[in-house]
Amino acid sequence: FNTNVLCFGNPDYDGELLTGQLHPRRIFEGVRKGIEDGGNKSGVPTVNGAIVFDDRYRGKPLVYCGTGAVMPMQLAGQDSWEKVILPGDRIIMAGGRVGKDGIHGATFSSIELDEAAPATAVQIGSPITQKLAMDFLILATRRGLIRCSTDNGAGGLSSSIGELALIPGGAVVELEKVPLKYPGLKPWEIFLSESQERFTLAVEPAKLDELLALGREMEVELTDIGFFNAEGSLDVLYDNKPIAGLSLEFLHEGVPRKTLLAEYVKPAAQEPVLPPSLDYNDVLLKLMGSLNICSRESVIRQYDHEVKGRTIVKPLMGATGQAPQDAAVVRFNFES
C-alpha cells in the first residue's frame, strides 16, 4: 500500500512571494498531480494519508511518501532481509537513463530556498519506466538472479553504490558506460543525478547473461557499469581516468556528528475567554469549513485506492461513501 503526509502553505494566500517562488496552491496541485500520476501507475493502492496547511510551509512544502509491503522470509534460498555481495560481483544499473534532472535533489530538500535554487534538483519522473523496473526486480529476485539491490533516490549512483560497497568492502564504477538521456553531462553529474525509477543491482557474474535476457524480455534497460571488490574504497573512473577515489571509512564516518544544545521554554497556557453571545452553530460551521478540518474527498478521489482488488476498508466509506475512515485494511492475499 501507499501512504503520504503532505504539508503546504495556505492555498488561498494573497500576500507577496519571493522572486521565483511558486504560490502554495501551485505547489499543492503539483504534489497532488505527482501522486496521482506516479502512484496510480504503480499498481499499488494509495489507501490513506494526511494533508496539513500551515503558513510555515509557504516557502517549502513537507512531503512524506511511503510504501508498505510484505515479503517472503526467504527468496531463492536466501534470507530476504540479508544483503550479500561478494568481490567480483557486477554493478548493474537498471531502469531509467541519467539526465541533469535530480542533481542535488537530496541537498535541495534541506537548504534555504531563494531565486538561485537550481531547477535541475527536481526529478523528471517516468512512472511507466518505474513500473516496468519494479515488475522486473520482483521476478529477477524470485529467480535468484540478483544478490541485492537499492534505488537511485537521494544521491543517485553515488549513494546507492557507496552504500552497497560497504558489504564486500569496495567498488569500481565506470561512468562512461552509464546510459544517458542526452549527451553533455559531466562525470560528477552522472554520478549524482537521482531518480526513483533507477536501481543499482549486485549480480553474480555467472547469472549476468540470464539477467540481461530477462531485461530485454521485460523491456527494462540494464547496463554493466563496474564491479565490487574488497579494496576498501569507492573508485570512480571515466574513460579509464580516475575521477574520484574515497575510502569507505571516510565516506561513511568521515564527517563528525554535530552536537546542538537547546533549551525548552514551556509556553504559558491560558484558558480561552468565550463571549456569552457566541453563536456555536456559526462556530461549528466555520470549524468544519477550515482548511485543516474540511473534507479531503476531492483529493482522495484522484488516487487509486482499489488497484489489486485487496482494499477492504477504504479511505471513504459509509452509506454514501463519503465518511473518512481512521485506518485502511488491505488483504495480504485473496485467501486471507
Image: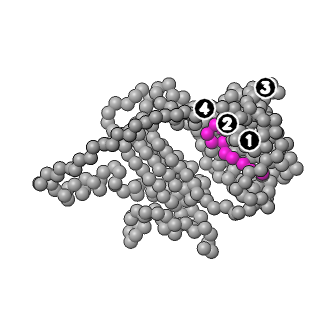
Label of residue 166 in the image: 1
Could you tell me which residue is drawn at 45 percent across and 47 percent down? 6
Query: Do the residues under discs 1 and 2 have CB atoms within 8 angstroms?
Result: yes
Query: Do the residues under discs 3 and 1 have CB atoms within 8 angstroms?
Result: no
Left or right, 192 with respect to 5, comes to: right
Q: Nearer the viewer, mark 3 or mark 4?
A: 4
Q: Look at mark 3 in the image and give the residue it sits on.
A: 242
Could you tell me which residue is drawn at 43 percent across and 63 percent down? 326
Q: How far apart are marks 4 and 1 (CA)?
A: 19 Å
Q: Nearer the viewer, mark 4 or mark 2?
A: 4
Q: Which of marks 1 and 2 is nearer the N terminus?
A: 1
| Residue 223, percent from left and from top | 78, 41
Could you tell me which residue is drawn at 22 percent across and 50 percent down? 271
Q: Look at mark 4 in the image and give the residue it sits on.
A: 256
| Residue 5, percent from left and from top | 47, 50
State the residue in front, 79 or 268. 268
Query: Do the residues under discs 4 and 1 have CB atoms within 8 angstroms?
Result: no
Secondary structure, mark 2, is helix
Q: Look at mark 2 in the image and give the residue it sits on.
A: 252
What's the residue type where badge 2 is placed?
His
What's the residue type where badge 1 is placed?
Leu
What's the residue type where badge 4 is placed?
Pro
Q: Is residue 209 visible?
A: no
Q: How far apart are marks 1 and 2 (CA)?
A: 9 Å
Within 10 Å of the Cα at label 2, are there few (<14), some (14-19), or many (20+) other Cα atoms? Answer: few
Q: Which of marks 3 and 2 is in front?
A: 2
What's drawn in magenta, residue-wise?
Answer: 147-158
Within 10 Å of the Cα at label 1, are there few (<14), some (14-19), or many (20+) other Cα atoms? Answer: many
Q: Earlier in the sequence, mark 3 or mark 4?
A: 3
Left or right, 177 with respect to 277, comes to: right
